[in-house]
Amino acid sequence: MKQAAARNRRNVTRKSGIKTLGKSVRAAAAAGNATDAAARFQTAESAIAKAAKAGAIHKRTAARRISRLARAAAASKK
């Protein structure tokens, strides 16, 4: 039970961090700051991939989130 609780805490922390990073990418994109959005996207993409590798989120969920953030970051360049 202790292991499950520790893993749950770790996974919740990872998921929360991913959500925060996603919000920062979208905020930078909405502000029209393409360079900042691209830099934040790289950080978010790395965190999402690591969470999927660790099993905190499913690999298809990770791919979907990365794809959506990439579209948001690319939209700020236009």
Image (spheres, rainbow, N blue to C red):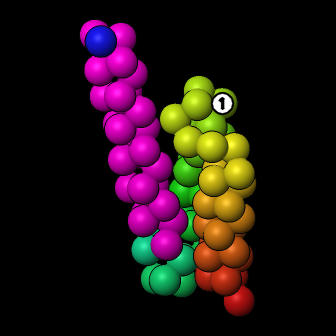
Q: Residue at x 63, y 53 (%)?
A: 61
Q: Residue at x 66, y 30 (%)?
A: 53
Identify the amino acid type marked 1: Lys
Q: Nearer the viewer, residue 1 or 72?
A: 1
Quadrant housing the N terminus: top left
- Magenta segment: 2-26
Q: Position of residue 29 (x, y in %)?
A: 54, 77
Q: Position of residue 33 (x, y in %)?
A: 54, 76
- Whether the magenta-drawn stretch holds residue 57 is answered as no
Classify mark 1: residues with Cα within 10 Å, few (<14), some (14-19) or many (20+). few
Q: How many marks?
A: 1
Outermost residue toward the bottom? 78
Q: Nearer the viewer, residue 27 or 20?
A: 20
Q: Residue at x 42, y 56 (%)?
A: 19
- Judge from the rendering whether residue 67 lies leftward or rightward of residue 28; answer left or right: right
Outermost residue toward the front? 1
Task: Name the main secondary structure of what is drawn in magenta.
Answer: helix
Q: Nearer the viewer, residue 60 or 40?
A: 60
Q: Which residue is mark 1?
A: 53
Q: Position of residue 41 (x, y in %)?
A: 60, 58
Q: Residue at x 49, y 83 (%)?
A: 30
Q: Is residue 35 visible in the rendered structure shown here?
A: no
Q: Position of residue 5 (x, y in %)?
A: 29, 20
- Judge from the rendering whether residue 66 lies leftward or rightward of residue 30; answer left or right: right
Q: Is residue 17 visible in the rendered structure shown here?
A: yes
- Whether the magenta-drawn stretch holds residue 11 is answered as yes
Secondary structure beneath label 1: helix
Q: Nearer the viewer, residue 17 or 2?
A: 2
Quadrant housing the C terminus: bottom right
Picture quadrant of residue 76:
bottom right
Picture quadrant of residue 72:
bottom right
